[in-house]
Image (tube, rainbow, N blue to C red):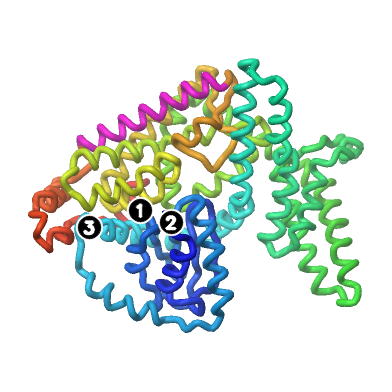
Amino acid sequence: MPDAQQLAQQILDSVGGSANIADVENCMTRLRVEVVSTDAVALDELKSTEGVMAALAAGSNLQIVLGPGLVDRVADDLEALRAAAPSAAAGGAGASSAAAASDASGASGASPEELAARGASIKASARSRSDGRTMRAIRKVSAIFIPLIPALIACGLIAGINGILTNLGWLPGVTPFLGVLSSGFLSLLAVFVGMNAAKEFGGTPILGGAVGGIIVAAGVANVTVFGETLAPGQGGVLGAMAGGILAAYVERFMRKVTPDVIALIVVPTVTVLVAGSITLGVLMSVAGVVSVAIGTAATWLLANGGAFAGFVLGGLFLPLVMTGMHQGLIPIHTTLIDQTGWTVLLPVLAMGGAGQIGACIALWVRFRSNASLVRTIRGALPAGLLGVGEPLIYGVTLPLGRPFITACIGGAFGGGVVGLFDQLGHSVGAIAIGASDLSLLPLLNGSSGYGWALLGYGSGLIVAYVVGFVATLLFGVSDSVRADLEAQSSAPSGDPVAPHAPLDVQVTPADSAGAAR
């Protein structure tokens, strides 16, 4: 495992130094770096850095795939390095690596660097086409929920273990203890959503939490609005999110108009009073209706659409990931978990990653003599099996074109199997988000219990693996690409040109987008 501090320093050097960094943030697997000047960034050097699974550039925004856990440590160390050298000159490292990038220009083939470069080009083009107001709004809303994912996974896993022990009748003295551990966070989920919403929209997190806390307060049961008595938790995370956003806007307005001498008292009081009253009087009722509608629609879709609905959803998930639109599903998943205890959408959508694993294994088997391609797949496959699919998307399937399509086909058939179980009355759900593929197994639940959910999800995984594998073997690689990959495989090991043999795979962004559609 690479040293986080050393990796942070290498990333800092590759992006042009601390003076060239405008902002740094991270999600579960990716480090997002906003740079001042793209000319100072040594992207090829960044991609070849040990520990970096992929590096994607979309204008001034760099997305560096590091994987779960490591990305958190690197983000902290990178921020520390920036703080320690605020006046570091930009461009030195970028300039020093520009020559190396220039020397490598024109080199192509099935090397990890070349595949990653093609993936980055496709990703950048797709993002530039979709980087409008809608996508910015989706990313802003998803940023409210992403920090909650580790706690959702932890509490969901504890709840799953507790459920198994309870069903088996084991350790009756321990299960109440585990029940409290798993439910404490979920009972206050609205508070944390309110805090993150206020923070994301420029307000004080604790004031957003105060407004979000109104939703789960027991005293809500004593409040009547428009002749209807409210219930604690009504509106759920959607109401808390709306209340937190409203609190941020009220607070920002009050800070502009309130004299500094009384701001400490007036601003928070008015913020909670105004935003809290509107949340209690309007937002809880409206968000409650929306939440119920989302739950009803998702359940109806899979209960009635069954295999067909699962086929469509499973096949479309990888294109959603490619464009970033999958982030818009996070509030829906969270709402379903808050409302019913699990989300029926996640197990179906997870089949897209399973189909991709089958496709990559087929490429490994078919071109096992191609050391460069095998090295790329071997490095990214473990992360894929644990639900981190971006290295395989941008490093293998998407740059090669057809394997991305066959991966989607595998995901579609796997989603169809999971959807069939839903249609038969054995719904397959996930009690937490942020996990996928094998890492989702302990987090399953559904209308018929863990056993049926495991059977449905496991069957879908196997089908997605097999169909993705077979489809890729049969028609996942064009004749020209196959000839080039085989030519590189058969090149003498001592030939210095072999690792960089030209690979005639001109996958344009437009072609990939069209294939994804």
Q: Position of residue 483 (x, y in %)?
A: 11, 49
Please name the residue shown 69% across and 25% down the image. 175
Instruction: Say the numbered circle drawn on residue 394.
Output: 1
Distance, label 2 to label 1, CA atoms, is: 10 Å
User: In this view of the protein, can residue 226 be seen by the observer?
Assistant: no
What is the distance, in whole Å, between disc 1 and disc 3 at their CAs?
A: 15 Å
Q: Which mark is residue 65?
A: 2
Q: Are marks 2 and 3 in contact (CB under 8 Å)?
A: no
Query: Which residue type carries mark 1?
Result: Tyr
**Label 1 neighbourhood size at 10 Å, few (<14), some (14-19), many (20+)?**
many
| Circle nearer the N terminus (2, 3) | 2
Locate residue 193 relative to residue 462 in the image: left or right: right
Q: Measure how far apart labels 2 and 3 are at the Cα level.
A: 24 Å
Q: Secondary structure at mark 3?
A: loop
Quarter location, residue 195:
bottom right
- Classify mark 1: helix, strand or loop: helix
Which amino acid, mark 3?
A: Gln
What residue span does the magenta drawing correspond to? 450-474
Residue 13 visible, this orientation: yes
Residue 80 point in image, percent of width and height: 57, 70
Q: Position of residue 467 (x, y in %)?
A: 31, 31
SS at mark 2? strand
- In primary-sequence order, the first of circles 1 and 3 is 1
Report which residue position mark 3 lands on.
506
Query: Is the C-beta separation of discs 2 and 1 under 8 Å?
Result: yes
- Of circles 1 and 3, the one toward us is 1
First reached walking from the N terminus: tag 2 or tag 1: 2
Residue depicted at 32% across the width and 76% down the height: 97
Q: Amino acid at mark 2?
A: Val
